[in-house]
Image (cartoon, rainbow, N blue to C red):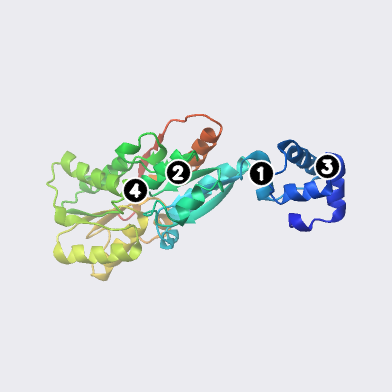
Amino acid sequence: MNDSTLPRSTYAEISELAGVSKSTVSRVFNGDSRVHPDRVAAVFEAAKQIGYRPNRAARALSTGRTGLIAVVIDDDVSALGDPFWGMVTSGVSRVLMQNGLQTLLMVAPLDDDDGPVAHYLESNEVDGVIFAQVHKDTLVRKVAKSGVPVVVIGTPSDDATDIHFVDTNNVAGGYMGTNHLFKIGCKTVATITGDIGTSAGLHRLKGFELAHKENNVKLNKNLIAYGNWSFDSAKILMLRLLASNPDIDGVFAANDISAMAAIAAIEERGKRVPDDIAVVGFDDTLVSQTSRPALTTVKQDIVGLGQAAAEAMLEIISGEKPDSRILSTELIIRQSA
């Protein structure tokens, strides 16, 4: 029910309990900031007694909080085709809902630190912002400087050390997946990276490079294909890798979707997985478990990543200073490698 169209009997009841006029009740429920705080508090207490819940704008006037936490993914809407983001946001939402807060999902490139997204985040419409897949820290630092609580999913750049973050140990995961390919006998291992403009993409590539070093294998940069996490991009890149490097016998893909695209390209060229080319992914989303062959992958706690971000946000809102967290990874061996 809209607050401006409440039955007169409801206004009258709240008015009587609060000891204010019905017009004052109306002004409170419609977000009039000129109402004295004592009267606002009295109206909300009366509303609570009769079991009425006012709208978010009015509640924000009373408490100074909106009850909303924004989750901002630095990408275009095509990113939502990756099940990874659904799992992350479910982890965030689960924790927030248990604490009476709601999740506001926003997906937009954050290359403009003075654009519509920036203006919204700085306009007191949300109680905090969880940024994900950040390419540049400029907007993150700007929002944090404005006093809005900020948490980043991913490791910020070196000049943003004051920003709280949660992340997966992506270097270790990249190493783990690539090292497995060497240990099962692969000699020529390629990679399809994620977006290396993000910390996850860059760190998984560093893990790939580290595995070469640890196994005394010279790194061939022609075996590095720079992707963007998407199926279409990864398939095209895998076809190019096969055309220019016919001796490839192993592939580490930076996410499960890219690994599935690599398998499709390999099979399209008449080769078999894992008999001819072994493939390892990263994430352990449902697609890795249901694919044929079932995908060997580096498991990260995706839901836990979202939960950790939400828990950190709650601590910051409460005035605490939580430590940043790095979650561990685990190699899940299935049929593809």
The kind of residue on which mark 2 rests is Val
Write down the residue under mark 1: 61
The label on residue 108 is: none
Mark 3 and mark 1 in contact (Cβ < 8 Å)? no
Cα–Cα span, label 4 and label 3: 51 Å
In the figure, is residue 248 to the left or right of 263?
left
Mark 3 and mark 4 in contact (Cβ < 8 Å)? no
The label on residue 136 is: 4
The kind of residue on which mark 4 rests is Lys
Can I make out residue 246 in this image?
no
Mark 2 and mark 1 in contact (Cβ < 8 Å)? no
Quick one: SS at disc 2? helix
Cα–Cα span, label 1 and label 3: 17 Å
Tell us which disc is closer to us: 2 or 3: 3
Tell me residue 121's x, y (percent): 50, 49
Residue at 49% of width from left, 55% of height from top?
106
In the figure, is residue 47 to the left or right of 139?
right
Quarter of the image for residue 35 reads top right
Of marks 1 and 3, which one's residue comes earlier in the chain? 3
Tell us which disc is closer to us: 4 or 3: 3
State the count of labels: 4
Of marks 4 and 2, which one's residue comes earlier in the chain? 4
Cα–Cα span, label 4 and label 1: 33 Å
The label on residue 143 is: 2
Write down the residue under mark 3: 20
Work out whether 42 lies above or below 177.
above
The kind of residue on which mark 3 rests is Val
Please, which residue is most extreme toward the front here?
Answer: 34
Residue at 19% of width from left, 49% of height from top?
185
The kind of residue on which mark 1 rests is Leu
Of marks 4 and 1, which one's residue comes earlier in the chain? 1
